[in-house]
């Protein structure tokens, strides 16, 4: 399902069919909202954020639509939290022109209702903490780092751009990924980037809630390719290897030494090659 929705589409179906939620990192920054909305304040502490999401109460039978001031920071974070809690929310695209029948009310909307306890489940295969990532026994997905998204995702009418056009812009922005594999996305723009990646690839996508700037922040990685498990002590530089190497033939980097594991699993030290701009680690992304 396309996770994005334009306000004009909501008007066409009927605004009473939707539950609008304004998502903000700071309640004091809200200056106006779609009439009938509720306010969800996002806690910066990851565990408190998860507990808040697990406590939310929504009217039955309505489609949840998340939005924010237009930068997608709050709404995309809330999207992944709600998705992990079992909801199927939609993300409201930036409003270019206010459709007829929509009223923007000044001030801040009422807070969304929460239960006294965190009663909902939370799927940490959809939204992961850094600890969840460290404890994964195997990786069937590629790791994709997204720190910058410097392009608009909507057209002049406020509709989401075609997936092939966004795919091309992501590649031109230096975001590296394999289109036919699932992904775990991390970085400063992981929440929006993960949504776009799911939209253009149609594959499963998970996001890391905690901000991880470098893949080596994950102290011990375990990767699995083609049914055989191999371990690496740092993110595997697939750029300098064949995509379909056997799982027991890999390289990992430890400090200034490289460790090569052959088919007989014997270790030998070798000098680490200098990285160039063609390596898998760049300022914006990395693919494992």
Image (cartoon, helix red, strand yellow):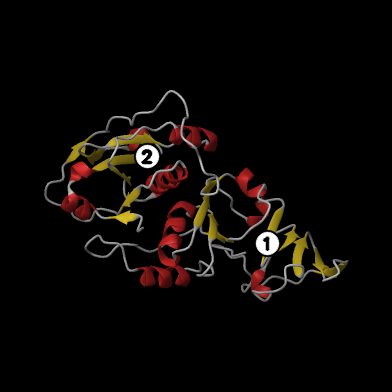
The quarter of the picture where residue 38 lies is top left
Q: Position of residue 208 (x, y in %)?
A: 54, 49
Pick out the residue farthest to the bottom.
242
276 up-or-down from 253: above or below = below
Question: Closest to the observer: 238 or 14?
Answer: 14
Asked whether residue 221 appears in the rendered view, the answer is yes
Query: Label 1: which residue?
Result: 224
Query: How many angstroms separate mark 2 from mark 1 (CA)?
Result: 38 Å
Pick out the residue farthest to the left.
100
Q: Position of residue 244 (x, y in %)?
A: 66, 74
Q: Is residue 24 left or right of residue 51?
A: left
Question: Which residue corresponds to the image point at 67% horizontal and 66% vertical from the top-left?
Answer: 225
Q: Position of residue 40 (x, y in %)?
A: 36, 36
Q: Is residue 81 left or right of residue 288?
A: left
Question: Which residue corresponds to the image point at 47% horizontal and 29% vertical from the top-left?
Answer: 118
Sequence-wise, the earlier of marks 2 and 1 is 2
245 up-or-down from 14: above or below = below
Query: Label 2: which residue?
Result: 24
Looking at the rendered structure, the number of numbered marks drawn on it comes to: 2
Q: Name the quarter where the C terminus is drawn.
A: bottom right
Q: Are marks 2 and 1 in contact (CB under 8 Å)?
A: no
- At mark 2, the secondary structure is strand
Nearest to the eye among marks 2 and 1: give it.
1
- At mark 1, the secondary structure is strand
Q: Is residue 10 left or right of residue 263?
A: left
Pick out the residue farthest to the top.
116
Question: Which residue corresponds to the image point at 33% horizontal and 45% vertical from the top-left?
Answer: 66
Asked whether residue 235 appears in the rendered view, the answer is no
Q: Name the quarter where the N terminus is drawn.
A: bottom left
- Residue neighbourhood size for the residue with mark 1, other residues' Cα within 10 Å, grouped as few (<14), some (14–19), many (≥20): some
Question: Which residue corresponds to the image point at 46% horizontal and 52% vertical from the top-left?
Answer: 191
The quarter of the picture where residue 104 lies is top left
């Amino acid at each position: 399902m396309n996770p994005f929705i334009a306000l004009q589409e909501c008007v066409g179906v009927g605004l009473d069919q939707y539950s609008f939620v304004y998502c903000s990192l700071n309640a004091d920054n809200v200056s106006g909202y779609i009439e009938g909305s509720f306010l969800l304040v996002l806690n910066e502490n990851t565990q408190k954020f998860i507990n808040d999401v697990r406590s939310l109460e929504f009217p039955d039978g309505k489609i949840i639509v998340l939005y924010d001031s237009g930068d997608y920071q709050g709404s995309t974070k809330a999207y992944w939290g709600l998705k992990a809690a079992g909801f199927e929310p939609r993300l409201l695209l930036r409003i270019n022109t206010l459709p007829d029948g929509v009223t923007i009310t000044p001030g801040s909307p009422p807070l969304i209702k929460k239960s006294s306890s965190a009663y909902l489940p939370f799927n940490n295969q959809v939204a992961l903490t850094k600890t969840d990532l460290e404890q994964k026994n195997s990786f069937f997905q590629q790791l994709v780092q997204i720190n910058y998204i410097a392009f608009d995702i909507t057209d002049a009418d406020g509709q989401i751009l075609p997936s092939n056009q966004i795919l091309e812009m992501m590649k031109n922005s230096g975001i590296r990924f394999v289109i036919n594999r699932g992904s775990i996305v991390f970085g400063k723009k992981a929440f929006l980037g993960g949504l776009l990646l799911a939209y253009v690839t149609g594959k499963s996508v998970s996001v890391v809630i905690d901000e991880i700037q470098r893949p080596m922040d994950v102290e011990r990685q375990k990767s699995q390719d083609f049914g055989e498990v191999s371990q690496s002590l740092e993110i595997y530089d697939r750029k300098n290897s064949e995509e379909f190497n056997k799982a027991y033939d890999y390289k990992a980097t430890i400090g200034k030494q490289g460790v090569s594991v052959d088919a007989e699993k014997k270790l030998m030290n070798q000098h680490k090659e200098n990285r160039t701009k063609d390596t898998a680690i760049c300022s914006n992304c990395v693919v494992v």
